[in-house]
Image (cartoon, coloured by chain):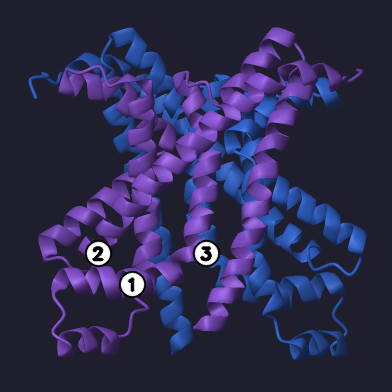
Chain colours: A purple, B blue
Amino acid sequence: MKFNFLFLLGYIDPLLAGLELTLKLTVGASIAGIVLGFIASLLRTYGSAPVRALAAGYVELFRGTPLLVQLFWFFFCLPLLLHVDVGIVVASLTALSLYMGAITCETFRGSLALIRKEELDACVALGLGRMTRIVHVILPLTFVRAMPPLLSNIVSLFKESALVSALGMADLMFVGQNIANTSARPVEVLTTTALIYFVVAFPLTRCVGRIERKVLKRF
Amino acid sequence: MTYSFDFSSISSGLDALRQGLAITFLIALCANAIGVVAGFGVGLLSQARSRLIRMLVSAFVEFFRCTPALVQVVWFFYCVPIIFNVFLTPVTMGILVISLNLTAFNAEAYRAGIQSVPREQHDAGIALGLSPFQRAIYIVLPHAFRSAYPVLVTNGISALQQTSLLSVVAIQELMYRGKELASDTYRPLEVFTTVGLLYLAVSVAVAQILRGVERRRALRYSV
């Protein structure tokens, strides 16, 4: 068996286009998911009992089922329930964001638990309103501490986003599989696809370690 | 919401889903058995004295941690037969991919525990004349396993969920059976909801049992 990676030079453009879509999905779902996760973690920590149970149910539901099932569910079932054709982009983004929300909720919950009682008492003593307390005290405190795990959550979302290819979204994985099938050279194409994912994800995971050490030094 | 649910229409496919669930269980169990054992081995090797071994181990771990599981699945199914000229049955191949992925993640989980073994205990092991293998099993493993346990549980449950990726390469596990049933009955809503609930029920049940074990063990050690 002879391998020839050179023919892939002709496929650089579609692969990069696939990578672009993958990155867009990752960024979009990360932003939506982090906002959602922060709100969910507040509800799960400070809410009333039914609110806490609801937030916990949401997290368990999305962490307890495979992302692939969620993607299929949103793609096939949302249109049936809502009677609107949501389209593949909206379905994938919704599923990825909700999944990311559940994952980051757990991350934020961990750092919310580290907020000291004194810090909250200080807010009461200063007479800060609920919104001010959340935005100016809780948010910055949790965010700094949650930074390293959040980054790893984003890296896993980047990897998990390859699943949208199963719905037919033309992301990096989909493009790679397509080229592999049409060129009948799966070894070269799939290895390259894997390497592209690796080249993006690996430096990010290194950053996580570095930021982690910095954060640990501060606290 | 005007959609009328009709779960009876998929009752004919429940047998298929049950068979799928059995395959899912089989793959997840084997992958976890391999992952828990091999993960410790790889974790030990990551502390090896030889630089070459350390580099090889970290290349293995980083490759599996930094590429999507789906890419690994597809890569193994398409490329392993071509490169190595070995032809495994689909289920065996599925177990192989999922367990290698899990091994890489578990190795990371064990690492901290392996590093936390105090120097004196190693020395005591040497003084008692234990072989390196005996030291690994009787001194390092109990430390590492105890501290890695919660992460091993989390990783094991994600491996269970990752078996759903194998539906992409036509292994007849739960998700594959679900997709088949959805297109046969034209009832994706009922089918995918059922499939999702099955995964959820299994994950939650397994998590509860394994965390319960952890609590009981923690109690025993705290006395």
Q: Quadrant of residue A167?
A: top left
Of callouts 3 and 2, the N-terminal one: 2
Q: Chain of mark 2?
A: A
* Co-location on one chain, circles 1 and 3: yes
Q: Left or right: where does residue A77 sit relative to residue B16? A: left
- Could you give the CA–CA distance between mark 1 and mark 3, rounded to whole angstroms? 14 Å
Image quadrant containing the N terminus of chain B: top left
Give a yes or no on whether discs 1 and 2 share a subunit: yes
Q: Residue at x 68, y 42 (%)?
A: A198
Q: Residues within 10 Å of mark 3 (few under 14, many from 20)?
A: many
Residue found at x 37% / y 74%: A141
Residue corresponding to mark 3: A148
- Chain of the residue on which disc 3 is drawn: A
- Chain to which mark 1 belongs: A
Residue depicted at 29% across the width and 37% down the height: B197
Q: Residues within 10 Å of mark 2 (few under 14, many from 20)?
A: some
Q: Name the one closer to the observer, A133 or B16.
A: A133
**SS assignment at label 2:** helix
- Residue carrying label 2: A42
Disc 1 designates what residue? Answer: A112
Circle 3: residue type: Pro
* Helix, strand or loop for disc 3: helix
Task: Name the spot of residue A15 as percent of width and height, x first.
Answer: 65, 24
Q: Position of residue B198 (x, y in %)?
A: 33, 36
